[in-house]
Image (cartoon, rainbow, N blue to C red):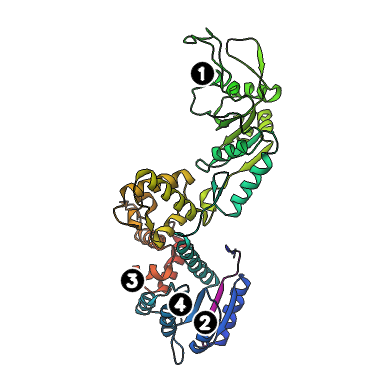
């Protein structure tokens, strides 16, 4: 099992069976957690009084005080702790009571190591999200190079910018759309000794192929129909500074030859002219595609690839940046609310969790657009999950396919219910009106004989 936190989470396990405690202790320690154990509720409370604990895993039925008594004690005395109930006497009534009292998960014995690890990881993930949300309103946001985030991935980006700024070597910035490639390009330029010279961004995919050469290199008067005056191109405009060739992968092979000449000779030739001109321009290129894969397919010149791939960095997608999402939510919320003359909205913990769990195919740009919509359309003071765009909210797709067998339909419905509760089998069993053991059997049967 791969841990997602740098510091060890502290887990207290409570069970009147010494054998069960031993197995749980061994498994959880092997997964990287710091584990404490108690044979009864009284011992557990003594540990809780003196030891910071993140998660309590407690048996439900024990001699004397039960797991429900411990759960209630925790809920009324500790605000920053999660609880998982385990029991050898599972029932829907027991599960409902435990969850109503405040348990995050409910595991029926015997459970597999995978089920235990999944429940623990899911519960701790929610705890960390809630903790981050509690810091959300007051934590001061600092930026460098205009970049927001404290994740290791963003620390690596800042380190790259600082090193790239010391040279004039060509830079290639790769990454999905919306990850901030132009922001990084600007940071490289304005941190370098070229900062006082122009930074000229060019979207190679937005300029028609027949106009791109003229836009980049300029043209002479009369070079083509409509060229009533001579005009310098982007390379001449950026002389002494930096030109940012955004989405360089969108250029044609013919244009790539001409870009290669500029990189090799530091010269440009205006359309309609036979004379070249020297330019002192640093080139920063970007792509949201795998350039090397394009090279192998013959869609991008290998020699140009080697020329631009001198200092290269791949920007991390938003979904891999952890709590950076919360910092970005606050930053954009404050900025957009001020621009629109509206109050800065608050976000419920559940809403923040949904935003963190969403895969963000459009990355930071998509997050900014979503927040702008929320500020405009949300009526209340707090953004709740139903306020989010439908795309971000789970919905069970209803389809009428009368060619599917009853087993197929049942299996698909079970999978959809599981997805709706983020894989929580206890809650899924409650929704389906069956116990956890029955749910496990149905899942095993569907995986063996039914394609869902």
Q: Which residue is mark 4?
A: 78
* Cβ atoms under marks 2 and 4 closer than 8 Å: yes
Q: Helix or strand or loop: what does disc 1 sit on? A: helix
Q: Which mark is residue 48?
A: 2
Cα separation, mark 2 vs mark 4, equals: 9 Å
Task: Let me know if residue 56 appears in the view.
Answer: yes
In the rendered image of this protein, does residue 196 appear above or below residue 33?
Answer: above
Q: Which part of the image, by quadrant, shows the N terminus?
A: bottom right
Going 64% across and 34% down the picture, which residue do you hit? Answer: 296
Position of residue 348 measured from the top left corner of the image (x, y, whole percent): 38, 61
Q: For the point 56% across and 10% down, which residue is it?
A: 220
Residue in the image at 50% along x and 42% along y: 178
Q: Which residue is the site of mark 1?
A: 210
- Extreme residue in the bottom direction: 64
Secondary structure type for disc 3: loop
Q: In front here: 3 or 197?
A: 197
């Amino acid at each position: 099992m791969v841990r997602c936190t740098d510091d060890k989470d502290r887990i207290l396990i409570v069970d009147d069976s010494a054998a069960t405690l031993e197995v749980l202790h061994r498994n959880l320690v092997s997964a990287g957690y710091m584990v404490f154990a108690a044979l009864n509720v009284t011992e557990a409370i003594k540990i809780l009084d003196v030891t910071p604990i993140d998660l309590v895993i407690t048996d439900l039925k024990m001699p004397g005080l039960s797991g429900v008594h411990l759960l209630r004690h925790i809920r009324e005395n500790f605000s920053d702790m999660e609880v998982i109930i385990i029991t050898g006497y599972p029932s829907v009534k027991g599960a409902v009571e435990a969850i109503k009292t405040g348990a995050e998960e409910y595991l029926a014995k015997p459970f597999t190591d995978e089920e235990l690890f999944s429940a623990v990881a899911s519960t701790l993930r929610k705890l960390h999200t809630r903790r981050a949300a509690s810091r959300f309103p007051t934590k001061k946001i600092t930026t460098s190079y205009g970049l927001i985030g404290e994740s290791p991935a963003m620390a690596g980006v800042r380190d790259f910018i600082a090193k790239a700024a010391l040279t004039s070597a060509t830079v290639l910035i790769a990454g999905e759309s919306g990850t901030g490639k132009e922001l990084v390009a600007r940071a490289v330029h304005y941190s370098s000794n070229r900062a006082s010279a122009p930074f000229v961004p060019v979207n190679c995919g937005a300029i028609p192929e027949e106009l791109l050469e003229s836009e980049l290199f300029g043209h002479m008067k009369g070079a083509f129909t409509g060229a009533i005056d001579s005009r310098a191109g982007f390379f001449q405009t950026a002389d002494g500074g930096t030109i940012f060739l955004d989405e360089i992968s969108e250029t044609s092979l013919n244009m790539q030859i001409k870009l290669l000449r500029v990189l090799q000779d530091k010269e440009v030739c205006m359309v309609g002219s036979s004379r070249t001109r020297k330019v002192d321009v640093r080139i920063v290129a970007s792509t949201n595609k795998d350039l090397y894969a394009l090279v192998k397919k013959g869609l991008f010149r290998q020699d140009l690839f080697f020329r631009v791939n001198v200092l290269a960095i791949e920007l991390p997608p938003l979904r891999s940046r952890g709590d950076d999402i919360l910092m970005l939510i606050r930053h954009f919320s404050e900025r957009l609310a001020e621009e629109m003359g509206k109050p800065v909205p608050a976000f419920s913990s559940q809403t923040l969790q949904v935003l963190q769990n969403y895969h963000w195919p459009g990355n930071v740009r998509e997050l900014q657009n979503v927040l702008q919509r929320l500020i405009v359309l949300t009526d209340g003071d707090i953004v709740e999950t139903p306020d989010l765009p439908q795309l971000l909210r789970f919905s069970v797709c209803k389809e009428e396919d009368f060619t599917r067998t009853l087993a197929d339909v049942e299996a698909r419905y079970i999978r959809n219910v599981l997805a709706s509760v983020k894989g929580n089998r206890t809650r899924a069993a409650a929704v389906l009106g069956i116990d956890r053991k029955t749910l496990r059997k149905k899942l095993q049967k569907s995986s063996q004989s039914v394609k869902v």
